[in-house]
């Protein structure tokens, strides 16, 4: 996470982080990583694997520390969807707005 992201964490709360098939295979090969995920079974369709969220806080369970001073506990191994979530991008600013954080000042603490 960038410095801005460590002061924020908004995109790690309340969002569905779907793993690609290759990522699902990678996570399933590592007990530490697969424990951070959940499998969604959809009838006869192939199951989808997502990052798991804490039901009390809605935070991704890989997010460590309080919002405003947080870090991704699997930063080097995080899914592509997280890597693509660039600080300052429209999706980033929308996530910040949803969490009540300024969407025009990425230095504001969350
Ligand atoms: S919402 Fe934006 S600033 Fe906040 S953690 Fe995500 S990418 Fe970083
Ligand atoms: S894997 Fe890391 S970057 Fe992705 S949502 Fe979870 S805590 Fe955030």
Image (tube, rainbow, N blue to C red):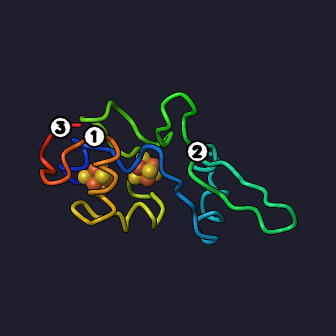
Tell me, yes or no, if residue 1 can be seen here.
no
Residue at image point 53% right, 54% down: 16
Tell me, yes or no, if residue 89 can be seen here.
yes
Which dot marks residue 19?
none
The reply to whether dot 3 and dot 1 touch (C-beta < 8 Å) is: no
Q: Position of residue 109 (x, y in %)?
A: 18, 37
Check disc 1 and report the residue beneath it: 100
Q: Nearer the viewer, residue 85 or 33?
A: 85
Q: Position of residue 78 (x, y in %)?
A: 45, 57
Q: Residues within 10 Å of mark 3 (few under 14, many from 20)?
A: some
Which dot marks residue 52?
2
Q: Position of residue 67 (x, y in %)?
A: 30, 35
The earlier-in-sequence mark between 3 and 2 is 2
Residue at image point 58% right, 32% down: 55
Left or right of 102 on screen, residue 79: right
Q: Position of residue 50 (x, y in %)?
A: 60, 55
Left or right of 54 on screen, residue 110: left
Location of residue 43 by image quarter: bottom right
Q: Is residue 71 above or below residue 75?
A: above
As helix, strand or loop, the secondary structure at mark 1 comes to: loop
């Amino acid at each position: 996470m960038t410095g801005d992201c460590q002061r924020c964490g908004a995109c790690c709360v309340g969002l569905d982080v779907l793993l690609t098939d290759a990522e699902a295979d990678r996570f399933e090969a590592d007990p530490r990583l697969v424990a951070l995920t959940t499998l969604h079974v959809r009838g006869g369709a192939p199951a989808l694997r997502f990052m798991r969220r804490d039901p009390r806080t809605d935070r991704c369970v890989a997010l460590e520390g309080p919002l405003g001073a947080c870090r991704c506990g699997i930063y080097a191994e995080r899914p592509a969807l997280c890597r693509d979530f660039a600080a300052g991008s429209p999706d980033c600013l929308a996530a910040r707005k949803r969490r009540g954080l300024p969407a025009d000042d990425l230095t504001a603490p969350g």
